[in-house]
Image (tube, rainbow, N blue to C red):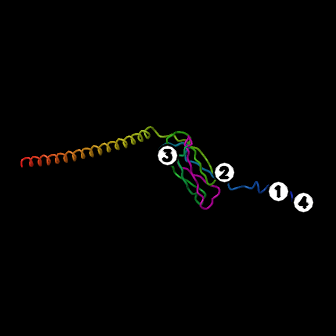
Amino acid sequence: MKTQLMIFTLFGILITSIGVSPTFGESGSVVVSTDKSSYSENDVILISGEIKYIALGDQLSLIIQAPNGNIVQLDQMTAGSDKKFSTEINPNGPYWKTPGMYKITITQNENNQATMSFEFTGLTNTAVNESVVEESVEESVEESVEESVEESVEESVEESVEESVEESVEESVEESVEESVE
């Protein structure tokens, strides 16, 4: 009986130890940081970090979300043999407009990820105005080109038709006059 109790106890300890052994996705397996806590439109955001566990071919995904939850940057990278990674991001795209706290998520796999936030001050009025002016200029140029092409085509067609009609009328009149004279 004592032997059975001892076997049962050892079996219980074995089962329990398997259930609490550390796993690959334990907390702190991915660390991420930026070189500053706040950025503006002309800054370069340096993102770096380290992973605790490295597996051959493991890709890290980078997702940056705006304050409203929209994804403004999506990228993939690989950690070096020293388990470190880094990338540079330029916050000058169509999605980088809203000022506020942006969230970085680095994911190694479904169990290993890290998040952090940084402040983005948004685009300055100059940058916004430049993009508005650029769009306006593009629209104006397109409209101007379309109008010029339409006018040129209309004039060319009108001239062609007028010349053809004039020539045709002249020939008809000449033929009629010649026939009536004869």
Near mark 1 (Cα within 10 A), the count class, few <14, some 14-19 or many ≥20, is: few
Measure the alpha-carbon separation of dots 3 and 1. 54 Å
Residue type (three-letter) at the residue carrying disc 1: Ile
**Residue under circle 2?**
28
Task: Identify the residue position indicated by label 3 in the image.
Answer: 91
Q: Crowdedness of circle 3 by 10 Å Cα count: few (<14), some, many (20+)?
A: many
The answer to whether residue 61 is left or right of residue 18 is left
Give the answer, above or below, for where 163 lies relative to 129: below
- Please report whichever mark, 3 or 1, sits nearer to the chain's N-terminal start: 1
Mark nearer the viewer, 1 or 2:
1
Q: Secondary structure at mark 3?
A: loop
| 162, 19: nearer the viewer | 162
Residue wearing tag 1: 13
Q: For the magenta stretch, what is the residue range? A: 45-69
Q: Which sits earlier in the primary sequence, circle 4 or circle 2?
A: 4
Q: Position of residue 20 (x, y in %)?
A: 76, 54
- Residue 123 lies, in percent from the top left, at 47, 40
